[in-house]
Amino acid sequence: MTNELTVAEMVFNKNSQSMTDSRRIAQYFGKEHYNVVRDIESLDCSAEFRALNFEGGSYLDAQNQARPMYELTRDGCFRLVMGYTGQKAADIKEKYINAFNQMERMI
């Protein structure tokens, strides 16, 4: 996978909510998109959590074929990424923990 994204480039605003999508996650982690879609579809989470944090959709690939994709909330993204391994996953998990700890200190 080429054209790596930064963490900041993974996020976009949709209706005043921070979101990402399965294509950006695949690009960031250097994974094939269909594997990220599979990972999302095989997550062991409640139907309520899935409905609130994973929105199915599609995009057109290079051959103009509709392919499945997902838009994910912050919570959906981190639910997915918590199962990933490797340096990029470790970095994201550490940043999430640090942000949580910083918020806790402010409270």
Image (tube, rainbow, N blue to C red):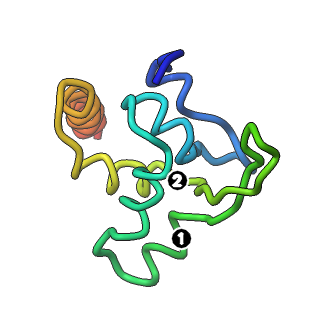
The residue that appears at 26% across and 26% down in the rendered structure is 88
> What amino acid is at disc 2?
Thr
Residue at the right extreme, as displayed: 64
> Which residue is more in the foreground, 44 or 33?
33
> Which residue is more in the foreground, 98 or 38?
38
Image position, residue 63 (x, y; %) = 77, 42
The residue that appears at 67% across and 56% down in the rendered structure is 67
The residue that appears at 63% across and 65% down in the rendered structure is 56
Mark 1 and mark 2 lie on one chain; the one further toward the N terminus is 1
Residue at the bottom extreme, as displayed: 47
Q: Mark 2 falls on what kind of element?
A: strand
Contact (Cβ within 8 Å) of mark 1 with mark 2: yes
Task: Give the numbered dot on residue 69.
Answer: none
Q: What residue is shown with label 2? A: 73
Q: Quadrant of residue 58?
A: bottom right
Q: What residue is shown with label 1? A: 52
Q: Quadrant of residue 18?
A: top right
Are there few (<14), some (14-19), or many (20+) residues within 10 Å of tag 1? few
Q: Is residue 100 visible?
A: yes
The residue that appears at 77% across and 53% down in the rendered structure is 65
Image position, residue 80 (x, y; %) = 34, 54
Image position, residue 45 (x, y; %) = 32, 75
Q: Mark 1 falls on what kind of element?
A: helix
Q: In the visual, does 83 lie left or right of 24?
A: left
Are there few (<14), some (14-19), or many (20+) residues within 10 Å of tag 2? many
Q: In the visual, does 36 lie left or right of 100?
A: right
Q: How many marks?
A: 2
> Which residue is more in the foreground, 64 or 3?
64
> What amino acid is at disc 1?
Leu
Residue 9 in the image: above or below residue 24 = above
Assign the C terminus to one quadrant of the image: top left
How far is mark 1 from mark 2, CA to CA? 8 Å
